[in-house]
Amino acid sequence: MFPYELIRLSDDENEVVVTVLAAESPTLWEAEIAVRSMFVSGRTLLMLFPSKFEEWAAALDRLAAGEDIAWMARHNGPTIRVFLDGARDCPDVEVDDESLSMVTVRIPIALEGDWIGDHRARLTRFLAG
C-alpha cells in the first residue's frame, strides 16, 4: 500500500503532493509534502494521525461549498491552504512549514475536473486499507 498518494493538486507546471510513506503504528503514519514548480521545489516530512484524515474530509466538504481551507493549521507541523480564487484566475495552494524550515511557498495550480471528488476517493481508498 505504501507509498500512497493521498493528495495531488497539480497542473502542467505546478504541484503539491502529499504521499503517505509508511505506517508507524495502527494510528500513526509518516508522510511527505512535496512542492514542485518551474521556480521552486521542496519537501517536508509530517506525521498523520486519524484526526488529520477527518480534518481533510471536512476540508474537502468546505472546498466543495466554495470555501478556502487550511488543513492542519492547528497542529505543530506544516499547514496546507487552498485559496480557490487565487491571483491568477485559478486556485493558489500554500504550504507553510513554519515549525521546521520556517518557509512558506504559495503557487497557482489550475485544478480541473472533479478534483474534489478525486480526493474524496483517494481518502476513502486509504482509510479502507
Image: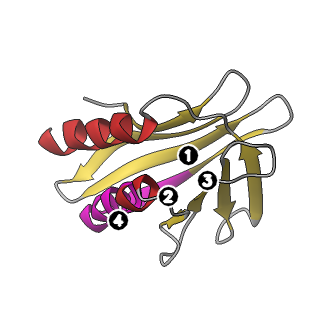
Q: CA distance from mark 2 to mark 1?
A: 24 Å
Left/right placement of residue 76 relative to residue 21 reads right
Q: Is residue 47 above or below residue 38?
A: below
Q: Position of residue 117 (x, y in %)?
A: 34, 38
Q: If you read the primary sequence from the N terminus, does the residue marked by circle 1 or circle 4 appear first?
A: 1
Q: CA distance from mark 2 to mark 4?
A: 17 Å
Q: CA distance from mark 1 to mark 4?
A: 16 Å
The residue pinned by badge 4 equals: 55
> Is the magenta region chiefly helix, strand or loop?
helix
Q: Position of residue 124 (x, y in %)?
A: 21, 42
Q: Are marks 3 and 2 in contact (CB under 8 Å)?
A: yes
Q: If you read the primary sequence from the N terminus, does the residue marked by circle 3 or circle 2 appear first?
A: 2
Residue drawn 67% across the image and 38% down it: 109
Residue drawn 73% across the image and 25% down it: 13
The residue pinned by badge 3 equals: 84
Which residue occupies the foreground of this view, 85 or 47? 85
Q: Is residue 106 above or below residue 121?
A: below
For disc 3, the neighbor class at 10 Å (few under 14, some 14 to 19, many from 20) is: many
Nearer mark to the viewer, of 1 and 3: 3
Nearer mark to the viewer, of 1 and 4: 4
Q: Are marks 1 and 3 in contact (CB under 8 Å)?
A: no
Q: If you read the primary sequence from the N terminus, does the residue marked by circle 4 or circle 3 appear first?
A: 4
Left/right placement of residue 41 relative to residue 119 reads right
Q: CA distance from mark 4 to mark 3?
A: 18 Å
Nearer mark to the viewer, of 2 and 4: 2
Image quarter in which the N terminus is found: top left
- Any mark on residue 33, and which? 1
* Magenta stretch in the rendered image: 45-60
Q: If you read the primary sequence from the N terminus, does the residue marked by circle 2 or circle 1 appear first?
A: 1
